[in-house]
Amino acid sequence: MTTSVLAREFERLATRNAELLHTEAGEGKSLAESNEYATEFEANLSKLEDLKNLLEKERSFDTLQEWAATPERKAAAFAADPGSDAPKASSRPRPGHEVVNSAEWQAYLKAVAPDGKISDNTDVHSAKFALKNALITGGAASGGAFFETDYQNNLYVPYIQPQLTVRDLVLNLRTDADVISYPRAVAHANAAVEVAEATTAADPAISGASPGPYTVAAASGVKPDGDFTWVTVTTTVNPIAEGVPISKRTLMNGSMVEDIIENQLRFDLAQRLNSQMIAGNGTDPNIRGIRNTAGILTQAFSNNVIETLRKGKTKVADPTTGSGKIPNGAVLTPTSMETLDLFRTGGSVAADGPFLVNPFGDAPRRMWGLNLVEDPGMTATKAVVGYFRDAVLWDRQQATVEVFTQHKDFAMRNLVQLLAEWWGAFGVLQPKSFVDCSMA
């Protein structure tokens, strides 16, 4: 019995009961006839309840059949049934046909209507069906319209990579001033010597006739004086800054966007600061970096990068050429670091034995006792070796990120400006503690 037949029967019984309900049984009717009307009314009422339940349970299945029988679904039929008026073209799937003929649907019907009828006491639940060819997720006009994208905005490709930096090597201090003056050591003669115990308290004897020359005898137990030369260096506190405009809607809808941008801006400042500390030209507002500081040492390329770095270390450590301090770090370009990593025991980067460096190690990278810093801002074909505690970075304001709505007409356009800024200065205390090495 189809839904339309059930509906017509329901309408017929309801109309009949309406007639019985408004019949005046007492006029010209016997008692027996009145009882017959009452019995018929009760029977019809019971049938109406049954029909109502059947209509509710079968309406969903009829709706599915109607959906599968629409012209659009027929036109998309994979292969029409024999005798069907659907076109027999093609290779396109027919969703309604696939659903009602699937094993899952047949099993579902058998469970809820084992004898072909859904009873009043059956607890009917919807079922899940596998549509192998019916819908695709590739387009909004197909199955894709029902799929929600789970966009994981806490996953992104970071530009930030924690590593040892130039800032980690140098001395970090703070300042509250706009201008910094500090002493720079430019020369020093080491006069330290062993001194014998004094044998007399007498002053040094002076001999010779006027007008001289005079001879001064060495006093007993006199200690020598060392020789130091300093110059006063003045540097100005300046900012390194970067900003980015962003809409309020983006900030509201993307919970991670602000954090991502803030971290990236801070990282950009740190990269620029590292580059400036190494090679800044000193033209205001640029920092004067180590390589552009007067008085640092130089080391020519010597056979290979490993040998060159070692000779640079020696120049600094030798008091006759450098400051006499043992260097603690070296800053190299990524290219020079690659050369070191690929160096082989045979003495080259060719196929001369195994690598000197263990490619699977995760320990801090060191060579000749130097902490190796790989910095993209390092000047090409150059490296700086030195005792980096003889360089100072003064922080006036550490890197901060602020949000402004007053920029231009941003407030009227629902835009905000994110601004990252660092204020500070940099100085080299002793130029001879650093050597500029040529790596090629």
Image (spheres, grey):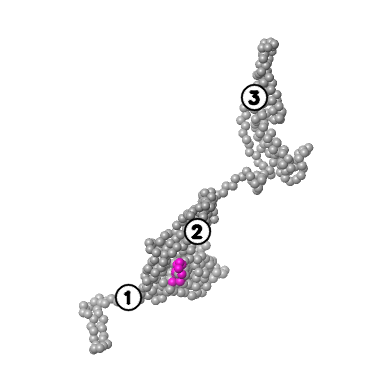
Counting from the top left corner in percent of width and height, residue 247 is at 53, 52
Counting from the top left corner in percent of width and height, residue 197 is at 25, 76
Counting from the top left corner in percent of width and height, residue 85 is at 77, 38
* Label 2 sits on residue: 243
Lateral position of residue 203 relative to residue 41, left or right: left
Tag of residue 24:
none
Front position in the image: 292 or 129: 292
Sequence-first tag of 2 and 1:
1
* Label 1 sits on residue: 226
Q: Mark 1 packing: few (<14 Cα in 10 Å), some, or many (20+)?
A: few
Residue drawn 23% across and 81% down?
204
Task: State which quadrant residue 207 falls in.
Answer: bottom left
Report the span colored magenta.
283-293
Spatial CA span between label 3 and label 1: 116 Å
Disc 2 or disc 1, which is closer to the eye? 2
Residue type, mark 3 in image: Glu
> Can residue 278 be seen in this snapshot?
no
Image marks 3 and 2: residues in contact by CB distance under 8 Å: no
Disc 3 or disc 2, which is closer to the eye? 2
Dominant secondary structure, magenta: loop
SS type, badge 2: strand
Lateral position of residue 230 relative to residue 375, left or right: left
Residue type, mark 2 in image: Gly
Look at the picture and state if 19 lies above or below 297.
above
Tag of residue 49:
3
Task: State which quadrant residue 108 falls in.
Answer: top right
Front position in the image: 71 or 24: 24
Spatial CA span between label 2 and label 1: 51 Å
